[in-house]
Image (spheres, coloured by chain):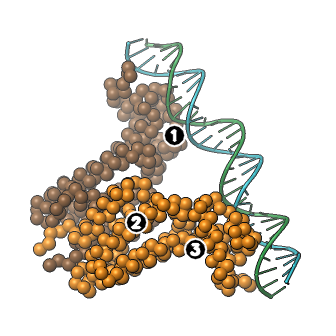
Chain colours: A brown, B orange, C green, D cyan
Amino acid sequence: MEHSRENLPDEIRQQILQAAEERFRQYGYNKTTMAEIAKDCDMSAANLYRYFENKLAIGAALACNCLNIDIENLKKIVFDRELTPADKVSEFILATLDFTHTQWSETPRMNEMVTAICHERLDIVDQHVQNKQALLITLLREGNQQGMFDVSDPEVTAEAILTAATLFDMPLLMPLFSREAFERKATYLASLLLNGLLKRK
Amino acid sequence: MEHSRENLPDEIRQQILQAAEERFRQYGYNKTTMAEIAKDCDMSAANLYRYFENKLAIGAALACNCLNIDIENLKKIVFDRELTPADKVSEFILATLDFTHTQWSETPRMNEMVTAICHERLDIVDQHVQNKQALLITLLREGNQQGMFDVSDPEVTAEAILTAATLFDMPLLMPLFSREAFERKATYLASLLLNGLLKRK
DNA sequence: ACGCTGAATATATTCTTGATTATTCAGTTT
DNA sequence: AAACTGAATAATCAAGAATATATTCAGCGT
């Protein structure tokens, strides 16, 4: 327990992450070796283990970064000054689709990595879902305050919205339809979520 | 083209299907051989090919049967005399979940087979989705007629409901949550779909 | 001719074994 | 002592042989 990883210089940790990301992007997670990452950083493979518990931990850190980009995008929507809460719900769902689909189609190796990592590290997926849900709750509360929404339990409803958007959240499902079909579905889903099925009195 | 499979006795075809189903159920699709199925029917393996194009076709027929059970269940809900249209939507979603989860947890080998088959035979999945959508359209129209729903385009809305229920439709996703969690989510989703987010005037 | 089979072939699966690679640790360098 | 490395170990992967299985087809019995 003598040399905990915490008090090692963060610059080197970042250098490692950067080198690893480059490799993972280009060749994929499985095909890049610890030795290669180490050489890119002018150090021995053994030294990597002073900064990260193992290869998976490097992947996990990068996966978190990647998922946080999604969260940042969604934040921009939720805290936008121009959009109405209703528009924000639509944009939220479309942005989710856009992130998943782009990730899947344009950086397949990176996506392969994120998927593989999330398979082992359920906690990362959990955290990501929690982050999204927190944003949705904020959005629903805002809608309530503006008198546009009538949501009695924002937490439960946020969970339901995430449930409804499952199709747009999993890279695994992206081969099922064309991008256009997905966008159509996302638009219709958003509209249904906003209006509901019951007749307005 | 001399002896098309169509005009061969259907009894034998059914016998083959029954034998195959028994084997698939017990040992799984991959681990049962054509020779075993043939022996169960007191015929040679070669003879199976007079009734089915190949092993996949046997699996496909059984998978269709299996999915049709789901459809029959849903039909009972849609054409029920007691339930209101709103209740039917809830029941529809819960029944979808129940079918998927039961299939996954209680007959894992059968489920493995259906999943494998559907991977090769996209048309079977397509047909199943179309069947479900047709039922939903009927249900939405009934709701409109009774003045309970206000759905302008039942076809589009049916598609949106299926989209929203994706989480409950894929055996692949069943490991994600406990049965209870799924039921909670299904209930909340149904309620959201019925009511929508917007405030009622 | 019709309905079927056994043997032949093509395809897929499993097993073995030799590398690669992740991970650890004693020891070197500063 | 602190920061690191090279070599040792353990776990994983990959190529190819061996096996098992799906599929075909020439021919047998009726």
Rendered view: A29 above or below C30: below
Q: Are marks 2 and 1 on the same chain?
A: no
- What residue is shown with label 1? A32
The type of residue carrying mark 2 is Asp
* Crowd tier of the residue under label 2, counting other residues whose Cα lies within 10 Å: few below 14, some 14–19, many 20 or above: some
Point 48% across, 60% down: residue: B106
* Spatial separation of the CA atoms under disc 3 and disc 1: 44 Å
The type of residue carrying mark 3 is Ala
Q: Quadrant of residue B73?
A: bottom left
> Which x, y percent locates residue B21?
60, 68
First in sequence: mark 2 or mark 3? Answer: 3
Q: Quadrant of residue B192?
A: bottom left
Q: Is residue B159 left or right of residue D24?
A: left
Q: Chain of mark 3?
A: B
Point 40% across, 41% down: residue: A60
In front of the other: C6 or B151 = C6
- What residue is shown with label 3? B61
Count of marks overlaid on the render: 3
Q: Chain of mark 2?
A: B
Judge whether residue B153 can be spotted in this image. Answer: no
* Crowd tier of the residue under label 3, counting other residues whose Cα lies within 10 Å: few below 14, some 14–19, many 20 or above: some
- Quadrant that contains the C terminus of chain B: bottom left
Rendered view: D7 above or below B124: above
Q: Say whether marks 2 and 3 touch (CB < 8 Å).
A: no
> Which x, y percent locates residue B116?
55, 63
Give the structural element (helix, strand or loop) at label 1: loop
- What residue is shown with label 2? B98
* Spatial separation of the CA atoms under disc 2 and disc 1: 43 Å
Give the structural element (helix, strand or loop) at label 2: helix
Judge whether residue B93 can be spotted in this image. Answer: yes
- Quadrant that contains the N terminus of chain B: bottom right
